[in-house]
């Protein structure tokens, strides 16, 4: 008898739970979950389709493609959220209207964030660099590794990871060393006035011509650049591929030092010749003693 009563009580409880409101709530929860799942699938599929289109386009580089795909995700999830709100019985119109006022207020509070976002759009549209390019921005230089809606990630030559805000990058001069397939190496060499300039240039040409990394076109340049107080300055300008720049630069410095020493071409240091007449008195020295002897003592 007690068992029958317990079963009847359990059945009545289940009937109470499965009333009209509970079923409606259950369907709403299931509907929201389905919207989220279907929304995620559609966004993933759309990103893949657009990614394929971007990869085949010559006008859209990898950096621009990543940026645009992230914007697609943001817009897609915004629409999914609006549909979920509608499913919950919430009218999104007042919320959107309120967002206009809220957005105006938040615009002042998040000026830097909005500035970075807009700067990111300008970087994407103008494409001053691509993923893998070696760039210089202000005092910072490195290889572009990634970009999102707020920042650009650089890898420096000493393997540091630098994250720079888009607004900071767009507000400065951007030097892209990988923009073309060639890069000029700028090197200076100083020799003494007593050294043979022709001989020095011949040695420099031998060094440059021995490097397979140096391109024949554009042709290298080796000329006298300046006549300084203590030296004759020569400029050496070979062209290489961007990846070979530092190889040529560092190897050249060492070989110049070794071959100039072997050929007795003097690399000068700053010096000043002082000529002192014999009969001119020098303050602090005995006037009866010759100047040369006084200085020696």
Image: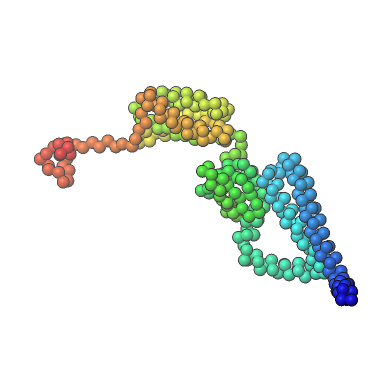
Q: Residue at x 58, y 33 (%)?
A: 241
Q: Measured along the vertical axis of the image, is residue 266 above or below residue 276?
A: above
Residue 198 at x, y percent in the picture = 42, 24
Give the answer, above or below, for where 89 lies relative to 73: below
Q: Left or right: 25 with respect to 150? A: right
Identity of the residue drawn at 61% across and 53% down: 151
Residue visible at 69% across and 48% down in the picture? 66
Q: Residue at x 69, y 43 (%)?
A: 61
Q: Is residue 149 visible?
A: yes
Q: Position of residue 2 (x, y in %)?
A: 87, 76
Residues 285 and 212: in front is 212
User: Extreme left residue here?
Assistant: 288
Measured along the vertical axis of the image, is residue 127 above or below residue 188? below
Asked whether, in this view, residue 26 is left or right of residue 236, the answer is right
Q: Position of residue 122 (x, y in %)?
A: 65, 51
Front one among 45 and 15: 15
Q: Position of residue 1 (x, y in %)?
A: 89, 76
């Amino acid at each position: 008898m007690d068992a029958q009563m317990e079963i009847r009580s359990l059945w009545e409880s289940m009937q109470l739970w499965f009333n009209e409101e509970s079923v409606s709530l259950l369907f709403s929860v299931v509907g929201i979950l389905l919207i989220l799942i279907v929304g995620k699938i559609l966004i993933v599929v759309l990103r893949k389709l657009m990614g394929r289109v971007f990869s085949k386009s010559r006008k859209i580089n990898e950096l621009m493609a990543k940026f645009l795909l992230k914007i697609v995700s943001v817009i897609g999830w915004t629409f999914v959220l609006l549909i979920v709100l509608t499913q919950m019985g919430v009218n999104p119109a007042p919320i959107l209207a309120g967002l206009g006022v809220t957005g105006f207020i938040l615009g002042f509070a998040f000026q830097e964030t909005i500035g970075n976002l807009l700067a990111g759009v300008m970087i994407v549209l103008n494409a001053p660099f691509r993923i893998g390019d070696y760039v210089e921005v202000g005092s910072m230089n490195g290889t572009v590794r990634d970009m999102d809606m707020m920042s650009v990630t650089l890898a420096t030559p000493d393997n540091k990871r630098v994250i720079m805000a888009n607004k900071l990058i767009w507000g400065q001069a951007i030097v892209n060393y990988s923009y073309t397939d060639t890069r000029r190496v700028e090197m200076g060499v100083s020799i003494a006035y007593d050294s043979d300039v022709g001989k020095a240039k011949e040695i420099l040409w031998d060094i440059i011509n021995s490097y397979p990394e140096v391109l024949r076109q554009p042709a290298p340049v080796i000329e006298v650049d300046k006549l300084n107080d203590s030296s004759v300055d020569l400029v050496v300008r070979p062209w290489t591929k961007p990846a070979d720049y530092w190889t040529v630069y560092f190897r050249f410095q060492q070989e110049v030092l070794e071959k100039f020493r072997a050929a007795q071409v003097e690399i000068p240091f700053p010096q000043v010749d002082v000529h002192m007449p014999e009969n001119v008195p020098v303050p602090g020295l005995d006037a009866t003693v010759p100047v040369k002897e006084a200085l020696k003592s």
